[in-house]
Image (tube, rainbow, N blue to C red):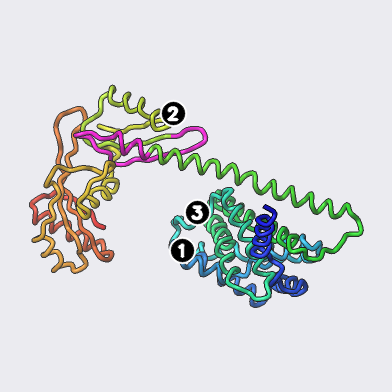
């Protein structure tokens, strides 16, 4: 038994030993200290990185954003603050804080300028992801900071630091904050700044903890009260930073569970012969959770609606409001863009899902002769199909039929050409009301 304990002890001390290839203590401190200053080349590299990251967020390119994070030197002052606290070097802490403030202001101003002049003003998914930080961002920043300090303390530098720069992602939140300022969306600004604050604080804390684990020599204060004050401030900052992120993580998890349950409910329960789901929207707020469904076809009567609401409890959707629009209300709100994706999926994939509009057999017709003619006139055409959609008139048994033509292009086409194609198809099919949907 003692032999097993001894072997296990040897295994862990040998495998997880950080002292063997540790650089000289003075070398570690000098290496981190020289990256704190933001002037000259460092400042220009930061500005260029901000422009690249802003472009990446603007066009929703993950690769470009990663490239910007690799260029950015902004982790230097953050690690400087953490190391300064770890070795009781208050001058390093002040220097790191000052340079971090300069870097932050320059980054926000630069990204605000970019987003003020860019013609693209839509918030893409990469940008939106930086507006709602949670407890997971705390973990990422913390473990990234630990990895960064381990890499900085080695004799031979490796590829860990670039990976830390990507994982902790200090750049994108600053760019998102600039987007919030330029568009006047202060919720985006506050969410992004909070994420940036989380990343900075926990990278610094991780650096501090790793410096203590590595037993870097500390400067001893003459007054022990100063040491206690520093420790007290550190604890306050950690608590103030982490509590809001825990609440936001709780909301994100609850929202995800609600949306998964709601999606399953719609997919499994809304199967009707003459009624189809055109669109579904799930709204989550602290006050009310809502499932909003738009139907087309035969109007569902009250017993069916009551049965659907009763079935919601089975999907853990208690106290969720079910809002179903159908008949006259639905017809007033139906937009062809709402059903475009569903029809295109039927035409091009030849398969039907529960939340798409299911047409009668052979209702979808891929007209090869028309496709051949279209390709001669417009070589960019790749797919073509026609379909009839049946829409029941409200409060009657009469059904209107709308003919839809669907065309897929390999590249975008001028609006004038689209109008010409629609007129040509109306003449070709002798259907003046034919509508053209393009992809």
Q: What element carries label 1?
A: helix
Residue 318 got which mark?
2
Q: In this view, does 122 lie above or below 68?
A: above
Circles 1 and 3 in contact, beta carbons < 8 Å? no
Q: How far apart are marks 2 and 3 (CA)?
A: 29 Å
Q: Reading the chain from its start, which is encountered first: label 1 or label 3?
A: 1
Which residue is label 1 attached to?
62
Residue 300 vs residue 63, the one in the foreground = 63
| Residue 60 located left or right of residue 242 | left
- Residue lying farthest to the top in this orientation: 303
Residue extent of the magenta highlight: 263-289
> Looking at the image, is mark 2 or mark 3 earlier in the sequence?
3
Q: Do the residues labelled 2 and 1 touch (CB within 8 Å)?
A: no
Q: Residue 47: x percent and y percent?
A: 59, 70
271 versus 137 height, above or below: above
Q: Residue furthest right?
A: 222
Number of the front mark, 2 or 3 = 2
Q: Residue at x 10, y 60 (%)?
A: 368
Mark closer to the chain start, 2 or 1? 1
Q: Residue at x 67, y 52 (%)?
A: 1
- In the image, 393: left or right of 96? left
The residue at 29%/46% (across/down) is 338
Residue 169 in which image quadrant: bottom right
**Viewer-side residue, 397 vs 416:** 397
Q: Name the residue under label 3.
A: 129
Percent from the top left, x then y, of residue 18?
69, 66
Give the quadrant of the C terminus: bottom left
**Residue 412 vs residue 76: left or right?**
left
């Amino acid at each position: 038994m003692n032999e097993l304990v001894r072997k296990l002890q040897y295994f862990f001390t040998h495998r997880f030993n950080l002292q063997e290839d540790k650089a000289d203590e003075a070398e570690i401190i000098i290496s981190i200290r020289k990256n704190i200053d933001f002037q000259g080349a460092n400042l220009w590299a930061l500005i260029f990185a901000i422009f690249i990251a802003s472009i990446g967020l603007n066009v929703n390119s993950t690769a470009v954003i990663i490239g910007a994070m690799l260029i950015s030197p902004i982790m230097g002052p953050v690690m400087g603050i953490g190391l300064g606290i770890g070795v009781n070097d208050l001058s390093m802490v002040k220097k790191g804080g000052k340079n971090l403030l300069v870097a932050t202001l320059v980054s926000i101003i630069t990204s605000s300028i970019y987003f003020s002049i860019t013609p693209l003003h839509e918030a893409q998914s990469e940008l939106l992801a930086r507006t709602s930080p949670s407890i997971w961002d705390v973990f990422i920043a913390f473990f990234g900071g630990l990895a960064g300090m381990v890499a900085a303390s080695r004799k031979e530098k490796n590829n860990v630091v670039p990976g830390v720069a990507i994982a902790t992602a200090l750049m994108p939140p600053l760019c998102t904050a600039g987007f919030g300022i330029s568009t006047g969306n202060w919720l985006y600004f506050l969410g992004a700044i909070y994420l940036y604050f989380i990343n900075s604080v926990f990278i610094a804390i991780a650096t501090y903890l790793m410096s203590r684990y590595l037993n870097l020599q500390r400067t001893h204060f003459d007054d022990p009260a100063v040491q206690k004050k520093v420790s007290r401030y550190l604890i306050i900052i950690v608590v103030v930073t982490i509590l809001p992120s825990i609440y936001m993580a709780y909301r994100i998890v609850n929202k995800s569970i609600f949306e998964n349950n709601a999606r399953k409910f719609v997919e499994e329960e809304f199967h009707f012969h003459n009624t189809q789901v055109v669109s579904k929207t799930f709204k989550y707020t602290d006050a009310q959770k809502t499932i909003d469904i738009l139907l087309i076809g035969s109007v569902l009567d009250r017993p069916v609606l009551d049965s659907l609401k009763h079935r919601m409890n089975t999907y853990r959707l208690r106290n969720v409001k079910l809002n179903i629009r159908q008949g006259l209300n639905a017809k007033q709100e139906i937009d062809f863009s709402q059903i475009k994706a569903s029809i295109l999926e039927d035409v091009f994939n030849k398969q039907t899902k529960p939340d798409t509009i299911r047409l009668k057999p052979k209702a979808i017709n891929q007209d090869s002769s028309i496709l051949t003619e279209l390709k001669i006139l417009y070589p960019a055409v790749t797919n073509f199909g026609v379909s009839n959609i049946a829409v029941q008139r409200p409060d009657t048994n009469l059904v209107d039929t709308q003919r839809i033509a669907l065309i897929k292009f390999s590249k975008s086409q001028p609006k004038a050409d689209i109008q010409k194609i629609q007129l040509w198809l109306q003449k070709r099919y002798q259907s003046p009301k034919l509508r053209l949907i393009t992809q």
